[in-house]
Image (cartoon, rainbow, N blue to C red):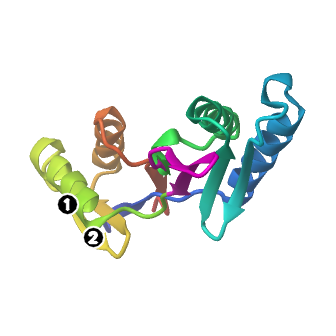
Amino acid sequence: MPSDSSFDIVSKIDRQEADNALNQAKKEVEQRYDFKGTDASIDWSGDSIIIKANSEERANAVLDVFQTKLIKRGISLKSLDSGEPLASGKEVRITSTLKEGISQENAKKIGKIIRDEGPKGVKSQIQGDELRVSSKSRDDLQEVQRLLKAADLDVDLQYVNYR
């Protein structure tokens, strides 16, 4: 009797790569001519990323530099959650966070996609901030992965523990 094959759907970020992207963005902001004299900066503040500049355009430009570095480091922009630029005194701030884990709402959405459009006999169950998908057929599991890659979800997914 063949046992069920399974894999986990997770949403994780390589913290070291995110840190490297932030440090590269910081270095570029410090060295670029168009940022001279604008007090533009980007730094960690706990788990958040704080972008400061003297105008909204400059703050958005720093955010754009950071996004470019994240992409080059292989981190999806779906995992970056940026707030609106807020003016406080003479500076504009943008607070961003890196999202990890699959929310209950997104996990239910993914489970519904698997139930409605996936192959018959594929089961999914929510386990904390990840999903376990199991089936007797490995081909069905690969079909589920293709289905989820094609779906337009607002969360970055990785597939791990393929057994």
Q: Could you give the CA–CA distance between mark 1 and mark 2, rounded to whole angstroms?
A: 8 Å
Question: What amino acid type should be assigned to the residue bearing mark 2?
Answer: Ile
Residue 78: in magenta span = no
Q: Residue at x 18, y 47 (%)?
A: 113
* Drawn side of residue 9 relative to residue 110, left or right: right
Q: Position of residue 17 (x, y in %)?
A: 72, 51
The quadrant the C terminus occupies is bottom left
Q: Nearer the viewer, residue 17 or 139?
A: 17
Up/down of 13 relative to 113, above or below? below
Find residue 56 and report its image quarter. top right
* Drawn side of residue 91 relative to residue 144, left or right: right
The mark nearer the N terminus, 1 or 2, is 1
The quadrant the N terminus occupies is bottom left
Stretch of the chain drawn in magenta? 82-98
Residue on which disc 2 sits = 126
Residue on which disc 1 sits = 108
Q: Which callout, 1 or 2, points to the residue nearer the camera?
A: 1
Q: Residue at x 64, y 71 (%)?
A: 46
Q: Position of residue 20 (x, y in %)?
A: 78, 50
